[in-house]
Structure formats: C-alpha cells, structure tokens
Image (tube, helix red, strand yellow):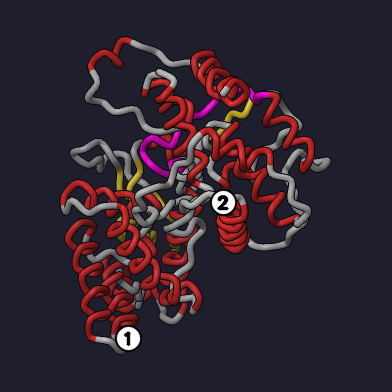
Amino acid sequence: MATLKLAVVPAKVLKNGRHKIRIAVSHKQDTRYIVQRYEIDNLNQFKDGQVVNRPDAGMVNSKLRTKLNDYQETLERIDPNIYTCSQLRDFLVKNTKIKQLTILEAANSHIEKLKKASTKEDYNRTKKYFIESCGNLPLEMITPDVIEEFDNYLRDQRGNNSTTRGIHLRQLKSFITPQIRKGVVKYQITPFYGVEVPETLERELDITVEEFKLIRDSDFKEKPLRVARDLFCLSYYLGGINLIDLLGIDFNKTDIVDYVREKSRYTKRGDKRISLTIQPEAKEIINRWKTHNGKLDFGYKYEYENFRRYITNNIKRLAKKLGINKRVVYYSARKSLVQHGFDLGISLEVLEYSIGQSVKKNRPIFNYVRIMRSHADAAMRTILDNLKNS
C-alpha cells in the first residue's frame, strides 16, 4: 500500500547547512521524495512530521498539509499497484494540480479594474519594484519579513521617503487583500500584521512641552476626547509605545512593561524586548481604564484597525479644540518624547532603547556600552519631571 508523509532526509543537507522538507512516497518497500520549497535551519526544527521551534511553523505546516492532501487525493484516484515507487512519484508530480497565485497575477488582476491611466501607472510601478526586490512570489510566501524587505529596498535602494514608501506599501496591500477575501490565499499571520505603514511626511508631527501639557491637562466631557487624551499621554509615558502593543499588555502582572513590538516580532530582530518601569503618571491612566483581566478597555467593540482610525481622528479633534495648529496623531506622542528627551541632553542610544528603536550600528562607541532598563527609567523620569517644572 502506497503512503505519503512529510519528511526530512538528514543525509541530504544543503550547502548552507539547511534542510529541504520533502513528501516521502513509500511504495513496494521503496521510498522516493517530492522536494518542497520550504527549508528548516536544522533538524531540531522538524519533529513527528511537523515544523517546530520557529515563529512561522504554523503557517508552514498548514501549507505543507494542504499540499500533502492534494497529492493524497491524486493517489486515491488510481491503482498504485501498477506502478513502481519511482513511477508513482513521477505520476503524482505530473498529475497533481497545485495552483499558487503569484503577486504578479494578483497585481494584474487588481490593476486591470482601475480606470485612470495615471493610477494604473502608479500601481504598475509598485508591482515592478516589488518583483525587482523580492521576486514574483506566490502570495502564500509573502510574510511580514518580506514586507519589511520591500520597505527597506524602497528606502535604501530607491531612496524613497516615508510618503512614497507608504504609498507603495498601501498599493501592495491592495493587491493581496482581495485574494484573502476570496479565499484564494489563507494566512495564519497576514503579511501586514504588525507592519506600520510609514506616515505621510509632515513638517510638524512632534509637539512642544507646552502643547503636550495642554493635552494632558484638558478636561472635556466628551468621552472620545478623553479617551484620545489618555491614550496619547499613556503612549508618551510608556516610551512611545505603539497602540497595538499597548492594547495587548496585561497590567495586572507587574509594575514593569516588558514586551516585543508587534512591528518587529516577525523580523530578524524580533527577539528585541522593551522593558520599562511604569511611572506614576502612567499608572493613574491605566487604573482608570484597566479591567479585571489587566487589559485596557475603553468600552468600544471596534476591530483594531477601526479603533486605531477612531483614535487618530479624535486626537486630531482634541488638538484642534486646544488650539494646537499642527497635525497631531498618535505617533506624535512617540516623536515628541524623543525630541523632548534629546532637548534635555539624553543620549540618542538611551532614547532609542526606551522606545524600542533599533540602535544604529555605525556608532563605534556604542559597541562598548550596554543600555539597561535603569538607564531608560532614569531618562523617562527626567522627561516626565520636566513636564512638572517647565
């Protein structure tokens, strides 16, 4: 009886030390293999027919299981006994239809529905740049790491500013999203999960200490404005924490926030943790909105993206009502924190650690310095005390 299973052949190690995952075709006391495109770093990442010990294991296992099922369906339609194992393997490869939509096909499908020639030109440019940098990948192979690679290419190779990069990333997302809705591709982790699309460049995104104090001390009766105020201030008090990270923290557990940014969780530096002591100013706001499970709850049932837009709009309204004639968004809290700290003489290395920003490698002296939570806590205290004294 012919059987199929996922396997790794230890003897067939690649030159880079990695191993290809294969589908083993066992028949008449012989075994042949159908090589898959997925690789593991070492044998410890494969156990009992499954990929383990890596962040994308669930997604990879799901895709491999789908392929295994496709081959199994082909096998069940024939009498395998008339074939040798080698012949059976070749038959399965030739007669199993595994359709994988590529980014080129998805992009063309979207672009042909556009009406304006200039708009089509813009979207074609995004398609061209993505394929130049990452290749014509099947949609299922596009992960947050790939999106980050594309963003880096736009920034470093093409010299695009944040406005242009944001446009390209949003257009790329428009190629993929319809295929997700139609069920053509399924992700355990969607490509843009945790990815912050660069904001449009503005001359003023940070605010002054005085303007921050206006927001902090505002006392509007309208709940949306109070929620916007508290979230803006809480981001500032907690090292410029992103909204998606803030909403995921269990504040019952500790007096310290210790987390990995969603933006970098699935990147090569995804193990970089941010650890800060919760300052009294932050605790006051946390206690106002914290529920029994330790999470913040503002009484809204929106999905995250809708809630983020809701908060963004109300922060803008709040700033306008306070007479702050700048474009103020949630990100302004993070940017303002860094600017205020820098103005107080706090080193960029400590500020970068405090907000979870990657430390630039081209500063030789930093190779000899270890930034710890105590440094970040002292920096935060200096910045917050300045709000009282100024």
Numbered-mark total: 2
SS at mark 1 in the image: loop
- The amino acid type, in three-letter code, at marker 1 is Leu
Residue of label 2: 323
Q: Nearer the viewer, residue 157 or 322?
A: 322
Residue type at tag 2: Gly
Judged by depth in the image, the label closer to the viewer, 1 or 2, is 2
> Dividing the image into 4 quarters, which one contains the C terminus?
top right
Q: Distance between the residues labelled 1 and 2?
A: 41 Å
Q: Quadrant of residue 263?
A: top left
Residue at 62% over, 43% down: 215
The quarter of the picture where residue 92 lies is bottom left
Q: Is the magenta stretch mostly helix, strand or loop?
A: loop
Work out whether residue 35 can be spotted: no
The answer to which of 327 and 374 lies nearer the viewer is 327
Give above or below for 262 relative to 303.
above
Q: What stretch is highlighted in magenta?
A: 264-279
Residue behind mark 1 = 114
Give the secondary structure at mark 2. Answer: loop
- What residue is drawn where x is 44% and y is 31%? 338
What residue occupies the far front of the structure in this picture? 323
Q: Is residue 64 left or right of residue 125?
A: right
**Label 1 crowd bin: few (<14), some (14–19), many (20+), radius 10 Å:** few
Q: Is residue 163 left or right of residue 233?
A: left
Q: How crowded is mark 2: few (under 14 residues within 10 Å), some or many (20 or more)?
A: few
Residue located 48% across and 67% down the image: 186
Determine if residue 102 is in view.
yes
**Residue farthest to the right?**
292
